[in-house]
Image (cartoon, rainbow, N blue to C red):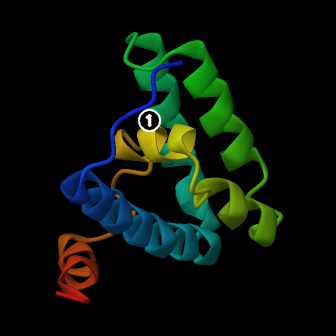
Amino acid sequence: MRRRTLTKQSAATDAQILRLHSAMADKLLAEPQRLGQILNTLEQRYQAGLLRHSGYIHWFSILDCIDQPELFKAALLDSGERMNKLRRRTVLVGILTEDERQAILMENV
């Protein structure tokens, strides 16, 4: 497996994406009815060939443990290279409003 060279810029981007995903996880746990829309996005991307089978299984297994909040957040916010890559093309779209997203991105600026 080829390892991605981590530049300061890509490390900063990964940190921003991680903060966004932390907020998305909290909102998804608070509003579990949103899970259906996320599963639809996952399925659509997989069927369209935009997601490899391994990525599909990885996302599905994370979403499948949403009823165990600690496990769900630990898996979603894992700092490994694999999850960094998956989060860059997240299926968790439409969870945060644009205002929520901007507020998170403006933190620590």
Q: Residue at x 18, y 84 (%)?
A: 106
Residue 6 position, x and y percent, is 33, 47
Q: Answer yes or no: is residue 42 visible.
A: yes
Considering depth in this image, is 78 or 22 the residue closer to the camera? 78
Residue 63 position, x and y percent, is 67, 48
89 left or right of 78? left
42 left or right of 89? right
On-image quarter of the N terminus: top right
Q: Which residue is mark 1?
A: 41
**Residue 107 in the image: above or below residue 86:** below
109 left or right of 100? left
Q: Secondary structure at mark 1?
A: helix
Which quadrant holds residue 105? bottom left
Residue 39 position, x and y percent, is 56, 39
Considering depth in this image, is 11 or 71 the residue closer to the camera? 11
**Amino acid found under the numbered disc labelled 1:** Thr
**Residue 76 in the image: above or below residue 46:** below
**How would you rate the neighbour count of disc 1 (Cα within 10 Å): few for under 14, some for 14-19, many for 20 or more?**
some
Considering depth in this image, is 58 or 97 the residue closer to the camera? 58
Considering depth in this image, is 15 or 35 the residue closer to the camera? 15
Count of marks placed on residues: 1
Which quadrant holds residue 85? top left
